[in-house]
Image: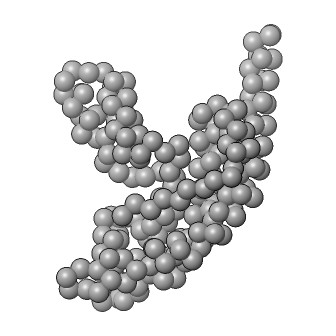
Protein backbone atom coordinates (compact mmCIF):
# COMPACT_ATOMS: atom_id res chain seq x y z
CA UNK A 1 0.00 0.00 0.00
CA UNK A 2 1.40 3.35 -0.99
CA UNK A 3 0.57 6.33 1.25
CA UNK A 4 1.17 9.86 0.20
CA UNK A 5 1.04 13.18 1.93
CA UNK A 6 0.07 16.24 -0.04
CA UNK A 7 0.75 19.69 1.33
CA UNK A 8 -0.49 23.06 0.26
CA UNK A 9 0.24 26.66 1.18
CA UNK A 10 3.92 26.44 0.40
CA UNK A 11 3.90 28.70 -2.68
CA UNK A 12 6.90 30.79 -1.65
CA UNK A 13 9.00 27.73 -0.81
CA UNK A 14 7.97 26.09 -4.08
CA UNK A 15 8.99 29.22 -5.99
CA UNK A 16 12.34 29.26 -4.17
CA UNK A 17 12.89 25.58 -5.04
CA UNK A 18 12.05 26.41 -8.64
CA UNK A 19 14.89 28.94 -8.78
CA UNK A 20 17.46 26.27 -7.94
CA UNK A 21 18.78 23.75 -10.45
CA UNK A 22 16.53 20.69 -10.51
CA UNK A 23 18.99 18.27 -8.89
CA UNK A 24 19.89 20.76 -6.15
CA UNK A 25 16.24 21.41 -5.37
CA UNK A 26 15.44 17.69 -5.31
CA UNK A 27 18.33 16.98 -2.93
CA UNK A 28 17.28 19.78 -0.57
CA UNK A 29 13.71 18.49 -0.56
CA UNK A 30 14.86 14.91 0.05
CA UNK A 31 16.96 15.99 3.04
CA UNK A 32 13.92 17.66 4.57
CA UNK A 33 11.64 14.71 3.83
CA UNK A 34 14.09 12.33 5.50
CA UNK A 35 14.05 14.57 8.59
CA UNK A 36 10.25 14.67 8.50
CA UNK A 37 10.03 10.88 8.21
CA UNK A 38 12.02 10.27 11.38
CA UNK A 39 9.14 10.82 13.85
CA UNK A 40 6.90 8.49 11.84
CA UNK A 41 9.61 5.80 11.78
CA UNK A 42 10.19 6.25 15.52
CA UNK A 43 6.49 5.69 16.25
CA UNK A 44 6.33 2.73 13.86
CA UNK A 45 9.26 1.12 15.70
CA UNK A 46 7.41 1.51 18.99
CA UNK A 47 4.13 0.16 17.57
CA UNK A 48 5.59 -2.72 15.54
CA UNK A 49 4.84 -6.18 16.92
CA UNK A 50 7.75 -7.71 18.79
CA UNK A 51 6.81 -11.38 19.14
CA UNK A 52 10.09 -13.35 19.10
CA UNK A 53 8.32 -16.50 17.87
CA UNK A 54 6.74 -14.79 14.88
CA UNK A 55 8.93 -11.82 14.09
CA UNK A 56 12.28 -12.77 15.66
CA UNK A 57 12.38 -9.26 17.15
CA UNK A 58 13.97 -7.72 14.08
CA UNK A 59 10.95 -6.01 12.51
CA UNK A 60 11.38 -3.00 14.79
CA UNK A 61 15.07 -2.68 13.95
CA UNK A 62 14.37 -2.91 10.23
CA UNK A 63 12.18 0.23 10.09
CA UNK A 64 14.10 3.00 8.33
CA UNK A 65 13.71 6.29 6.50
CA UNK A 66 15.42 6.37 3.14
CA UNK A 67 15.56 8.70 0.16
CA UNK A 68 16.88 5.90 -2.01
CA UNK A 69 14.62 2.98 -2.70
CA UNK A 70 16.15 -0.40 -3.29
CA UNK A 71 13.84 -1.74 -5.96
CA UNK A 72 13.85 -3.64 -9.18
CA UNK A 73 11.62 -1.18 -11.07
CA UNK A 74 13.18 -0.51 -14.44
CA UNK A 75 15.66 -3.39 -14.38
CA UNK A 76 13.69 -5.36 -16.97
CA UNK A 77 13.54 -2.27 -19.22
CA UNK A 78 17.30 -1.83 -18.80
CA UNK A 79 17.92 -5.48 -19.69
CA UNK A 80 15.60 -5.31 -22.72
CA UNK A 81 17.49 -2.34 -24.18
CA UNK A 82 20.84 -4.05 -23.61
CA UNK A 83 19.59 -7.31 -25.20
CA UNK A 84 18.31 -5.30 -28.16
CA UNK A 85 21.79 -3.92 -28.81
CA UNK A 86 21.30 -0.52 -27.19
CA UNK A 87 23.97 1.46 -25.40
CA UNK A 88 24.33 1.73 -21.63
CA UNK A 89 23.12 5.32 -21.88
CA UNK A 90 19.94 4.26 -23.65
CA UNK A 91 19.41 1.45 -21.15
CA UNK A 92 19.88 3.84 -18.21
CA UNK A 93 17.40 6.26 -19.78
CA UNK A 94 14.87 3.41 -20.06
CA UNK A 95 15.44 2.51 -16.40
CA UNK A 96 14.97 6.13 -15.28
CA UNK A 97 11.80 6.51 -17.37
CA UNK A 98 10.35 3.35 -15.82
CA UNK A 99 11.13 4.55 -12.29
CA UNK A 100 9.63 7.96 -12.96
CA UNK A 101 6.47 6.34 -14.30
CA UNK A 102 6.27 4.07 -11.24
CA UNK A 103 6.66 6.99 -8.80
CA UNK A 104 3.70 8.81 -10.30
CA UNK A 105 5.88 11.71 -11.41
CA UNK A 106 6.73 12.78 -7.84
CA UNK A 107 9.59 15.24 -7.58
CA UNK A 108 11.02 13.64 -4.44
CA UNK A 109 10.05 10.40 -2.73
CA UNK A 110 11.07 9.13 0.70
CA UNK A 111 10.42 5.63 2.00
CA UNK A 112 9.44 4.98 5.62
CA UNK A 113 9.07 1.35 6.57
CA UNK A 114 10.78 -1.98 6.99
CA UNK A 115 13.82 -2.76 4.90
CA UNK A 116 16.36 -5.51 4.50
CA UNK A 117 16.26 -8.95 3.00
CA UNK A 118 13.51 -10.26 5.25
CA UNK A 119 11.28 -7.36 6.18
CA UNK A 120 11.69 -5.37 2.99
CA UNK A 121 9.49 -7.91 1.28
CA UNK A 122 7.39 -9.10 4.25
CA UNK A 123 6.75 -5.97 6.32
CA UNK A 124 3.20 -5.76 5.02
CA UNK A 125 2.23 -9.10 6.60
CA UNK A 126 1.92 -7.91 10.21
CA UNK A 127 0.44 -4.59 9.04
CA UNK A 128 -2.47 -6.19 7.17
CA UNK A 129 -2.48 -9.72 8.59
CA UNK A 130 -2.80 -13.04 6.82
CA UNK A 131 -5.27 -15.92 6.87
CA UNK A 132 -3.34 -17.33 9.86
CA UNK A 133 -2.42 -14.10 11.63
CA UNK A 134 -4.52 -11.13 12.73
CA UNK A 135 -3.47 -7.70 11.52
CA UNK A 136 -1.20 -5.76 13.86
CA UNK A 137 -1.01 -2.34 12.19
CA UNK A 138 2.00 -0.25 13.04
CA UNK A 139 2.80 1.92 10.00
CA UNK A 140 -0.59 3.51 9.36
CA UNK A 141 -1.19 4.38 13.04
CA UNK A 142 2.33 5.85 13.21
CA UNK A 143 1.66 7.92 10.08
CA UNK A 144 -1.70 9.11 11.43
CA UNK A 145 -0.23 10.00 14.83
CA UNK A 146 2.86 11.86 13.62
CA UNK A 147 1.99 13.32 10.19
CA UNK A 148 1.25 16.76 11.62
CA UNK A 149 4.67 16.74 13.29
CA UNK A 150 6.22 15.75 9.96
CA UNK A 151 4.48 18.69 8.28
CA UNK A 152 5.83 21.05 10.92
CA UNK A 153 9.35 19.76 10.29
CA UNK A 154 8.86 20.36 6.57
CA UNK A 155 7.63 23.91 7.25
CA UNK A 156 10.53 24.80 9.52
CA UNK A 157 13.37 22.99 7.77
CA UNK A 158 12.60 23.49 4.09
CA UNK A 159 13.32 27.22 4.15
CA UNK A 160 16.69 26.61 5.83
CA UNK A 161 17.63 23.84 3.40
CA UNK A 162 16.70 25.99 0.38
CA UNK A 163 18.81 28.87 1.69
CA UNK A 164 21.79 26.57 2.34
CA UNK A 165 21.46 24.94 -1.08
CA UNK A 166 21.21 28.35 -2.78
CA UNK A 167 24.32 29.55 -0.93
CA UNK A 168 26.27 26.42 -1.92
CA UNK A 169 25.13 26.79 -5.53
CA UNK A 170 26.10 30.48 -5.65
CA UNK A 171 29.51 29.66 -4.18
CA UNK A 172 30.03 26.91 -6.77
CA UNK A 173 29.03 29.24 -9.60
CA UNK A 174 31.42 31.93 -8.31
CA UNK A 175 34.29 29.42 -8.24
CA UNK A 176 33.48 28.35 -11.80
CA UNK A 177 33.38 31.98 -12.96
CA UNK A 178 36.70 32.74 -11.23
CA UNK A 179 38.30 29.66 -12.76
CA UNK A 180 37.01 30.57 -16.23
CA UNK A 181 38.24 34.16 -15.87
CA UNK A 182 41.66 33.07 -15.19
Q: Position of residue 107 (x, y in %)?
A: 53, 43
Viewport quadrant of the C terminus: top right
Identify whether 154 is placed above or below 148: above
Residue drawn at x 25%, y 86% is: 133
Identify whether 175 is placed above or below 60: above
Residue drawn at x 30%, y 21% is: 87
The answer to whether residue 114 is left or right of residue 27 is left
- Which is more toward the observer, 139 or 24? 139
Identify whether 95 is placed above or below 52: above
The answer to whether residue 177 is left or right of residue 92 is right
Q: Position of residue 140 (x, y in %)?
A: 46, 74
Which image quadrant is residue 92 in? top left
Residue drawn at x 48%, y 59% is: 4
The answer to whether residue 8 is left or right of residue 59 is right
Residue at the front extreme of this rendering: 9
- Which is more toward the observer, 140 or 43? 140
Which image quadrant is residue 57 in? bottom left
Q: Position of residue 71 (x, y in %)?
A: 35, 51
The reply to whether residue 180 is in sight is: yes
Viewport quadrant of the N terminus: bottom left
- What is the number of callouts on the image? 0
Q: Position of residue 104 (x, y in %)?
A: 41, 45
Amino acid sequence: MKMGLGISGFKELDAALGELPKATARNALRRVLVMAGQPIAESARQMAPDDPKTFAGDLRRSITVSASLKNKVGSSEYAAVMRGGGTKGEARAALIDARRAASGGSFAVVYVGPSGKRWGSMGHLPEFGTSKMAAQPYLRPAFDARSSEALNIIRTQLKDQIEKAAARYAKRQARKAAKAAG
